[in-house]
Image (tube, rainbow, N blue to C red):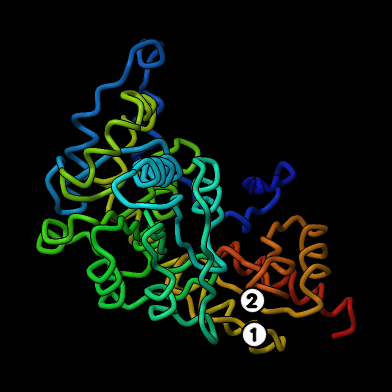
Amino acid sequence: MSEYDRPSAPAGALRLHLNENTGGCSPAVFDVLQRLTRQHAAFYPDYDAAYAAVGDRLGIPPEWLLLTNGLDEGILATAAAALRDRTRPGAPQGITLLPAFDMYEICTEALGGDVVRVPLGANFAFPKTAILAAVTERTRVIFLTNPHNPTGMPIARRDLIEVAERVAPIRVLVDEAYADFGGETLVDRALIPSHPNLLVGRTFAKAYGLAGLRAGAVIGSPDALAPLRSIVPPYSLNSWAAAALPAAMADRAYVEWYRAQAEESKRMLTAACDRLGLRCWPSAANFMLVDAGARAAAIARGLAARGIQVRDKSKEAGTEGCLRITTGVVDHTRRLVSALEEVLCAAGE
């Protein structure tokens, strides 16, 4: 069975390996957290304000929303709801792309399902035809990510909707963990009610800087969310996350600042890769995939020696020779580019 690779980083290292918000959370969020008391730790949280704030920010009624302990819990609940469905014949299967976020495969296998991996097309193109061809009577759920992880490339909204429509009633979870950077979303008042098999995942770890508080959400019609509500524990979201969400949703200027920082960082890293002879792909997320070929592992080690952690994906299927690098705060990206130049210079390249 697969297990999530939880990479560590030395204290004080620049963390460009987990797609976190490298600027931290909004100051308004930190102010709220500092005002919490011993009673907030002792009492079960109330979620009304959090649901109202997130629903308002996404433009949906709260009943279309399920808050979760990080989006990982939403993925797990989606897999559980889908794989326990015995209305269709055969041993249950889940479909994911290759490469993709590990948790889709991990959750499917942990709950007794088989995993079907559909490779991305040439140059990481979205393999819509191959996904549809992979669907059988055993298929219970399809996991997709937009923008995609680990490539950062966006998937056309019309293609995602077409997949959901053509495979119905099979569940489709579209993970929009990076949609705050990419712009396009399926969280739509007109779309959600007319697609009862569609679920949309969101996280507040990336643009909002709440990764350490573990706050995510699944969006869908009330009927689509009902099976997940019976699985997610009643107090899964902790008091600190519940208190932070309203403040995070209200501080739109902070999110816009971080999004602008990510855009500038992607331009800087793209220019550096062009100058240094490294290939990279356009990204709609807060990270970029860089093809360093046979040098990838050595570059990752060289950056680590200079206090910068990047994600070495070079030995994983579908991302051979590649590094995934967070593109967040511009000053951090300047430090990365300088270190990357040092590493390649030291190697005589």
Residue tagged 2 = 290
Q: Residue at x 32, y 51 (%)?
A: 88
For the question of whether residue 258 can be seen, the reply is no
Could you tell me which secondary element the residue under label 1 belongs to? strand
Label 1 and label 2: CA atoms lie apart by 6 Å
Q: Amino acid at mark 2?
A: Val
The crowd level at tag 2 (other Cα within 10 Å; few <14, some 14-19, many 20+) is: many
Q: Are marks 1 and 2 in contact (CB under 8 Å)?
A: yes
Across and down, in percent, residue 140 comes to: 37, 54
Q: Looking at the rendering, which quadrant does residue 99 occupy?
A: bottom right
Instruction: Compare residues 214 and 1 and report the one nearer the observer.
Output: 1
Across and down, in percent, residue 158 comes to: 25, 77
Across and down, in percent, residue 330 comes to: 53, 66
- Taking 59 as reference, is 36 above or below it? above
* On-image quarter of the C terminus: bottom right
Instruction: Compare residues 166 and 146 and report the one nearer the observer.
Output: 166
Instruction: Compare residues 108 and 239 and report the one nearer the observer.
Output: 108
Left or right of residue 171, residue 288 in this image: right
- Taking 12 as reference, is 48 above or below it? above
First along the sequence among labels 1 and 2: 1
For the question of whether residue 127 can be seen, the reply is yes
Left or right of residue 12, residue 60 in this image: left
The disc at residue 279 is 1
Q: Amino acid at mark 1?
A: Arg
Q: Residue at x 64, y 85 (%)?
A: 279
Q: Looking at the rendering, which quadrant does residue 176 occupy?
A: bottom left
Across and down, in percent, residue 342 comes to: 80, 74
The disc at residue 214 is none
